[in-house]
Image: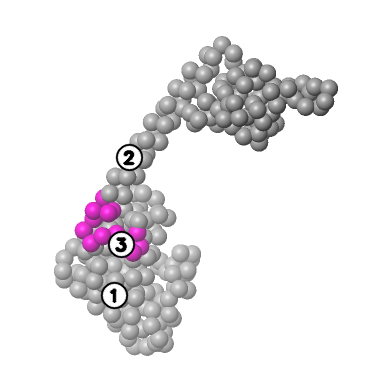
Amino acid sequence: MRIGELAAVVGVTTRAVRHYHHLGLLPEPERRANGYREYGLRHAVVLARIRRLTELGLGLAEVRDVLADDAGKDLVEVLTELDEDLARQEEALRERRARLRTLLDAEGGVPVEGPVSPELAALFAGTAHLSDSPMAAKDREIIAFLETAMPAGAWEQMVSSIGEALGSPEAVARAGDAYALLDALEGADPGDPRVDEAARALADCIPPGLFPEAREIDQGDSFLRAFYDDLPPAQAEAVRRALRILAEERR
């Protein structure tokens, strides 16, 4: 058989046959006097086995290991490992689908910052009306980012603290007032007297669990510096002052 005939019989492409030759999976036949390769039945048997193994999900390196053992002992081991790996993938897919279903079924729908955890989606749903504020919308984006960036334990503490801080209609109303004061500073000068008012209002909304240590927390933190750089000057100054207020009150 010529290479094209071999490929057609087994149901692969001639390119695949040449690739298997290159990887050493399929022995190359000797060339005849006319220069053409002549494939025999043994080549077809090996090629068919390669196809079956790859269709089961084995990588070519695993196929090489299987073919190297004529007794087939390694094949059972490799297929068992493949079955276990597929089982793990199935479990991971079930977990992912469950998370997706939780998000899709959540009250208020999927947040624009999503996908996020069910806990954060519930938190956002309870304060959805605040997202009309540009500053509140920015906060939501940052909180969604932190869910990805923070260690699990620290993130759980943060969500718990925010949930406690916004656990009543009065607390949500205070947060809305603070956001309104910050929004009003968008084009203001950092020395505007309204900066102090906004800083005090913001400090009153920040839950203690977010910054438990009584220290100056607006210096040397690369994330906070990036956050400040993303804000208009007066809003950045209000946030700085709010954090200083918290640091002083918790000493």
Can residue 213 be seen from the camera position used here? no
Q: Amino acid at mark 2?
A: Arg
Distance in Å between CA atoms under marks 3 and 1? 13 Å
Looking at the picture, tell me which residue is in the foreground, 208 or 51.
51
Q: Secondary structure at mark 1?
A: helix
Report which residue position mark 1 lands on. 132
Distance in Å between CA atoms under marks 2 and 3? 22 Å
Judging from the image, the colouring scheme is: one colour
Q: Is residue 4 above or below residue 147?
A: above
Residue 78 percent across, percent down from the top left: 50, 22
Looking at the picture, tell me which residue is in the foreground, 121 or 72.
72
Left/right of residue 3 with respect to residue 107 in the rendered view: right
Q: Is residue 9 above or below residue 76?
A: below
Report which residue position mark 3 lands on. 111
Q: Secondary structure at mark 2?
A: helix
Left/right of residue 123 with respect to residue 183 in the rendered view: left
Left/right of residue 81 with respect to residue 4 in the rendered view: left
Report which residue position mark 2 lands on. 94
Q: Residues within 10 Å of mark 2 (few under 14, many from 20)?
A: few
Looking at the picture, tell me which residue is in the foreground, 216 or 57.
57
Q: Amino acid at mark 3?
A: Pro
Distance in Å between CA atoms under marks 1 and 2? 36 Å
Tell me what residue is drawn at x 42 percent, y 31 percent: 86
